[in-house]
Amino acid sequence: MADSSYLSMKNITKVFPGVKALDDVSLNVGRGEILALLGENGAGKSTLMKILSGVYGHGRYDGTIEIDGKAERYANPSGAVSAGIAMIYQELNPLLDLSVAENMYLGMLPVKYGNSVDWKRLYDGADGVLASLGIAINSRMHMRFLGAGEQQLVAIARALARDATIMVLDEPTSSLTDQEVERLFEILKKLRAAGKCIIYISHKFNEVYAISDRVSVLRDGKNAGDFVTAEVESDQIITAMIGRSLHDMFPRKAVEFGEIVLEVRDYTVWHQHVDKVLLDRISLSVRKGEILGLAGLVGTGRSEFLNSLFGSHLGRHTGTVLLDGRESSVANPRQAKASGFGLLTEDRRTNGMVAIMDIGENITLPSLRQIGSLFTLNRRTERSIAEGFIGSLRIRCTGPDQETATLSGGNQQKVVISKWLNTEPKLLLLDEPTRGVDVGAKVEIYQLMNALSDRGLAIIWASSELPELLGMSDRVLVLWNGGIGGEFRRGEADLGTVMSLMTGSAALRSATV
């Protein structure tokens, strides 16, 4: 039985100018326990962990932190490390040209003769820690030759090398394969058995149920619930997270479709780096007000298809594209925008927005002619446009001047969607629109899709989450083996049927009958 009071954060309050980020929040975690910390983006999880890790040191918040019954008043991250606290972030940012061992012991390299690195002690120490975790990685190897999963394990080993008793993992599986996730969980179970105190932050409920002992929920900067994982249903957790019951997770409404907006005939898409056909002479169409979903495994060409329609795919594509019944040729995003296309990309931070720009600048970026001339911009118009979308899409922010990088993932998605809605598109292409956002933000995106459909906007979207794809699409096309392996209207197919087509097992069964 875990000691539930090894780490105790009591009555934590943190105020930023005009915003109370945390309001009297308390958190308890024991040795030998994995606590899942959940909440919508913007609920206060990151702020609470920044206080725990010393980013906001003692004196910059109200409340107390106790570790093993002792009050801690460290002023910075170094003090938190000395107190036995290790943060393992979603973005690892290792020093790629240093070895595994050097990354593990950075800032505390063993020395001899006063100022020379004791390489033997360094590598022996690193090998010992890695072996204790069952991690078969050469400590002399440079970090750049490791995969994302191995780099994640090295980050955990680094925490152990610093004798951490409290570990915080922030979305640790966001870039890992299923096999790497399983390996990570095996390591975490070893650490739990060794008496470590682990806080696990994730949006993925299957992971929460697989690895955690308890669940603590924050909502709007306050405690919203504390549960034993084995005794709580996911609906209860969701209700605690968003403050309301979700009777229908996917609120798709029936809409009367209009004329065909886009028709694609005999469309072929090649891989952008090698001479490989991803999609071979496919044909499809989408109507006004219709939401068309694309299902398929990674590598089947979903993203490449959407990007080729928008003119941003670097590989070749051939075929006929009809827009409002007339043949259209889009060679680049500028022409796509002029033709009435909008694209929300899979990776919003890399190519969906300019993180260092503010919200207003991002929303009006594709529409600069609307807010000024060749040499000047009308900031008043820019602000007015941004305020309109902030209100209508319920973007949680301090105002149009807030830097976009500081928003939560769900609100960043809304900014990118606003950017394209401001161009008044006919067709919106959405590539993994709910990736990396919490359950409450997902529901808001679904509701936005409904509202856009009501206005007659045609939507084609791709998602790796089959329940939402089936729940929110009027039709679903299953991509497999370079073509369309199946087509279903809403309610016609279940998860098993679609997965069978996506993996090719349905075709295999047919061939053996």
Image: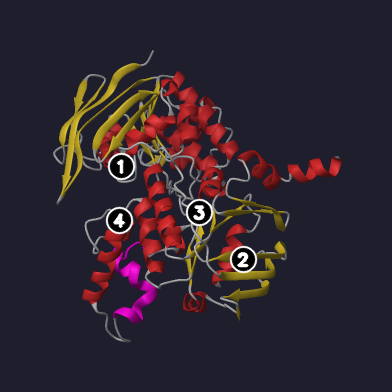
Cα distance in 3D space between marks 1 and 4: 18 Å
Label number found at residue 46: 1
Location of residue 113 in the rendering, given as x and y in whole percent from the top left corner: 38, 37
**Going from the N terminus, do you reach mark 1 or mark 4 first?**
1
Name the residue: 66% across, 71% down. 317
Which class describes the residues within 10 Å of circle 4: few (<14), some (14-19), or many (20+)? many
Give the numbered dot on residue 432: 3
Determine whether, in the image, residue 408 is placed left or right of residue 152: left
- Looking at the rendered structure, the secondary structure element under dot 1 is helix
Q: CA distance from mark 3 to mark 4?
A: 19 Å
Q: Nearer the viewer, mark 3 or mark 2?
A: 2
- Residue 155 visible to an observer of this rendering: yes
Magenta residues (range) = 355-371
Task: Give the residue type that dot 2 points to.
Answer: Ser
Q: Which secondary structure lies at badge 4?
A: loop
Question: Looking at the image, which residue is at 27% across and 53% down?
Answer: 396
